[in-house]
Every structure is written in structure tokens, then in C-alpha cells.
Image (cartoon, helix red, strand yellow):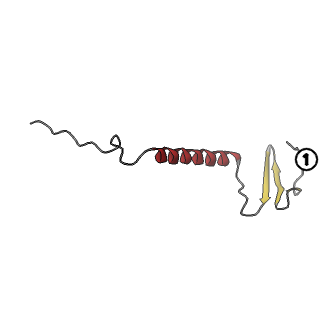
Amino acid sequence: MLVLSRQKDESIVIGDDVEVTIVDVRGDKVRLGITAPKSIPVHRREIYEAIQREKAAQRQSEQASAQQPSGDPQQAPQPEPEKEP
């Protein structure tokens, strides 16, 4: 991991397209401004992890559907038994 020291209004550049600027520092909070092309997703870590969990669950669901043969008698709805009077 590269660790850099920056002060308010200073920036770092990542590649040719991404710039991260220190917008504000208050106590233990640092506000960052990020300039990046729309093609590069930028998320807070907790949001990124939630997106990854959602994608994994969706892939798992799609794989389960693809593996299940259609017309499986175990998956067909069973008729309700007739009730005796």
C-alpha cells in the first residue's frame, strides 16, 4: 500500500484519469473529492462490498436455475388431497 501525506486542497493523481483531492479535514474525518470518468465506478468500501454480495447471490441464483431441469416433477405443484366430509 502506498501511503501519502496531503493537506487540504492538495491532490493525488491515479493513472491519467483519476484525481483525489482533500476537500476538508475535521478531527478524525477527511472529506475527499474524486474526479473520475463515468466508466470507472467509485464507491465507499461498505457499498462496494454490498454490491459484490448482491452480484454473488444473483450469480448463485442464476446457476441454480440453470442446473434445474424444466418440467421436473418434484417442482410441479402437487394437487391438494380431497377432504373427507
Secondary structure state at the residue bearing disc 1: loop
Furthest toward the top, the residue is 84
Describe residue 69's horizontal placement relative to residue 30 as left or right. left
Q: Amino acid at mark 1?
A: Ser
Describe residue 25's horizontal placement relative to residue 64 as left or right. right
Q: Percent position (x, y) of residue 80?
A: 22, 41
Q: Residues within 10 Å of mark 1 (few under 14, many from 20)?
A: few
Q: Percent position (x, y) of residue 41?
A: 71, 57
Circle count: 1
Q: Percent position (x, y) of residue 36?
A: 77, 61
At a point 83% along the width and 59% down the height, the residue shown is 19
Quick one: 5 or 38, which is closer to the camera?
A: 38
**Quadrant where the image shows the N terminus:** top right
Quick one: 54 or 19, which is closer to the camera?
A: 54
Q: Percent position (x, y) of residue 42?
A: 72, 55
At a point 14% along the width and 38% down the height, the residue shown is 83
At a point 35% along the width and 43% down the height, the residue shown is 75
Q: Is residue 38 above or below residue 32?
A: below
Describe residue 77's horizontal placement relative to residue 40 as left or right. left
**Quadrant where the image shows the C terminus:** top left
Residue tagged 1: 5
